[in-house]
Image (cartoon, helix red, strand yellow):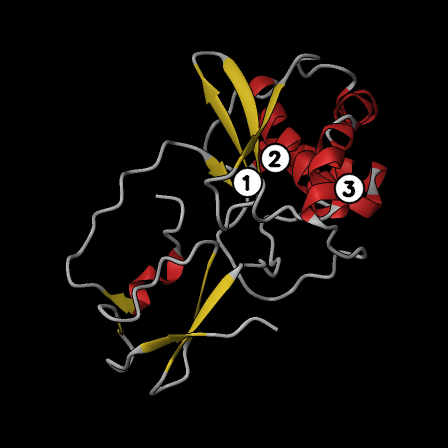
Amino acid sequence: KDDDSEDDALLTPISTRRRPRSRKKTPLSTKTSGGENDDDGPIPDGDFSRMRAELVKEYPRINEQVFDNRLPKDMDISWNNRMLTTAGVTVFKKGICRIELSTKVLDRPLRVCKTLLHEMCHAAQFILSGELRPPHGPAFKKAQIASAVFPQYAVTVSHSYEIRAKFSFTCTDCGHKVSRHTKSVNVYTQRCKRCGGGFVQDKKN
């Protein structure tokens, strides 16, 4: 379900739902705090949705300058609206590689380009080095070369992007906050696992 996220562990529902097991993949990160400096601000949703196709056109330029055009020219790059805290994944299955980018996390151009470069390094690890594990092991060495060629997109093992969510809820007792992309916290039936207090929905500014 789209509105599940890491801080579900801090909610006590009436009935406990079991989350489906995820596919094997190479996540960039599952961190949701820290506010990494992106050097550019978020773009309004309507404008950014039109820019995404243009931004992923960086792929052939990166492929040429970092990977000597050894990655597939027709790499499948798609947008995933179910990844709430993971910026991107590279999936390698039956000899075919594809990249998925998060619509929720990558809300500004520099994040898209940084994540695309990171995932292309994973694709090189899978396709060129034939190594699937560990995800950031010796075969991830292209990351150093990529960072030298594109210092503005410097590759890191994980991100610390602050993720914008439309809705937030606060525990009335301990003040813990829970963020959601949808209005999914039931303030009548769910309680804070930290203290057992109830939640109220925060007012939008």
| Residue 48 lies in quadrant | top right
Disc ID at residue 59: none
Distance between the Cα atoms at labels 2 and 3?
12 Å
Question: Dot 3 corresponds to which residue?
Answer: 147
In the picture of the structure, the residue carrying the numbered disc 1 is 136
Residue 182 in the image: above or below residue 176: above
Amino acid identity at mark 2: Phe
Kind of residue indicated by mark 3: Ser
Local secondary structure at mark 2: helix
> How many other residues sit within 10 Å of disc 3, few (<14), some (14-19) or many (≥20)?
some
Classed neighbour count for the residue bearing mark 1: other residues with Cα under 10 Å, few (<14), some (14–19), many (≥20): some
- Could you tell me which quadrant the C terminus lies in? bottom right
Q: How many angstroms separate mark 1 from mark 3 (CA)?
A: 15 Å
Callout 1 touching callout 2 (CB < 8 Å) = yes
Q: Are marks 1 and 3 in contact (CB under 8 Å)?
A: no
Left or right: 195 as drawn, with respect to 3: left
What secondary structure is found at the residue carrying circle 3? helix
Dot 1 falls on a residue whose secondary structure is loop
Distance from disc 1 to disc 2, alpha carbons, whole Å, reads 5 Å
Q: Nearer the viewer, residue 145 or 158?
A: 158
Q: Measuring 54% from the left and 19% from the top, which residue is drawn there?
A: 97
Res 149 visible:
yes
Amino acid tagged 1 = His
Is 91 positioned to the left or the right of 17 in the image?
right
